[in-house]
Amino acid sequence: MFNNEISSVDKAAPLVSLIIPIYNVEKYLSRCLDSVIGQTYKNIEILLINDGSTDTSAEIAEDYMHLDDRITVYHKENGGLSSARNYGLAYAKGAYICFVDSDDWIALDTIEYSVNLILNYNADIVQFGVYKTNGKKNIKERKEKRIILRGKEIIHFLMVKSTIDDSYYAAWRCLYTKEVLKDLLFPIGKINEDIVWKYKVFSNADLIVDTSKVKYFYYSNNGSITKNGLKKRDFDLYAAAEGIKELTQSEEYGKIKELGEVKYARTSLSLLCKIAFYGISDTSINKKDVVSKLKKDLKKDLRLLLHSPMKKSRKILALMFSISYNMTECCIRIAKKCIGS
């Protein structure tokens, strides 16, 4: 416990801006907003960016604005997640910035906890733990593991952890000082928009606190975009991975360069997994041709992946896909039936 912790009701506490893009989330928005307005840290502004919703999300957001004067609702034409986040950044007045996706929620002490870590460690960023949930399971508290990262070890940590868990590239699992963002904007019109953005933001940081303490609840359900079949825009992942690969080529620390190459090499595996688990949604995509190309890319990079920090289960899938896509897809279908997914 630090002696100079900010009180939850301290009026001199720095202003924190929470940016929440909204698009057709009427089923989940109240849960998200309740977690935000209920924060123990009171000096917050809540920027709700309605990105052209066609359901009742806009009305829900307006209702909450009338209940809490810390909320401002902005309405814009649909431009995607990156566009909505950039819109919020343009209006954010806080010393600290936090992103929350509107179908997720945060622990009630997330901001208080994170601000205190920033102040006590003089940190640029606090990255907290994430719990992936379908809304039914309860989290089991574990002993906190806290890591202080400086200089080159920040990027090395990001690259290693993101090889194991893609959520380390997510913009929403951090509290940032406004200074560390340095006017960096999210790329518009692309999915996987967090990847290069977060690498650049982390490259600006002198000190980061990473804590295993779970403060963010990531909602996953069968209607999630990640559980839809392959679409053409999913190949944006190649562009994002290429961006990371290019950025890491200039790194003096060779291990970071190697991890950038691993990120790119994993792309074919990720897309093959998406096809095998969820199929292809875009009728213009020829499955045979796409699988053949992805399998060729995977086999070319297989040795690199097998010697990477990637999870063992992923390495087994990579090996299986490189031997036979059809066999692997069949095994996955059988496994899904057995677990009832």
Image (cartoon, rainbow, N blue to C red):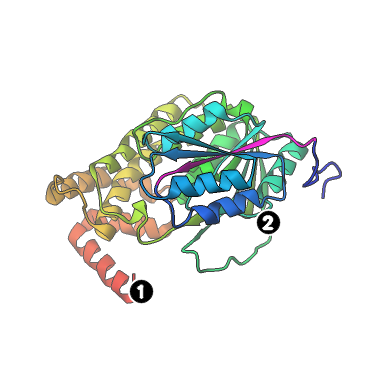
Would residue 148 appear left or right of 218 to someone viewing this image? Answer: right
The residue indicated by pointer 2 is: 144
How many residues crowd mark 1 within 10 Å: few (<14), some (14–19), many (20+)? few
Q: Amino acid at mark 2?
A: Glu
Q: Which residues are magenta?
A: 12-23
Residue 161 falls inside the magenta stretch: no
**Quarter of the image holding residue 95?**
top right
The residue depicted at 34 percent of the width and 42 percent of the height is 265
Q: Which mark is residue 271?
A: none
Q: Position of residue 85 (x, y in %)?
A: 48, 35
Instruction: State how many labels appear.
Output: 2
Q: Nearer the viewer, residue 322 or 94?
A: 94
Q: Which residue is mark 1?
A: 339
Q: Secondary structure at mark 2?
A: loop
Determine whether label 2 and label 1 are within 8 Å by CB: no
Q: Which picture quadrant has residue 335?
A: bottom left
Residue at point 77% right, 37% down?
Answer: 13
Q: Bin the neighbour count of mark 2 within 10 Å (Cα to Cα): few under 14, some 14-19, many 20 and up.
A: few
- Mark with earlier residue (2, 1): 2
- Please say whether residue 161 is visible from this viewpoint: no
Q: Seen in the image, is 74 located left or right of residue 268?
A: right
Task: Examine the structure image and report whether residue 14 is included in the region drawn in magenta.
Answer: yes
Q: Is residue 230 visible?
A: yes
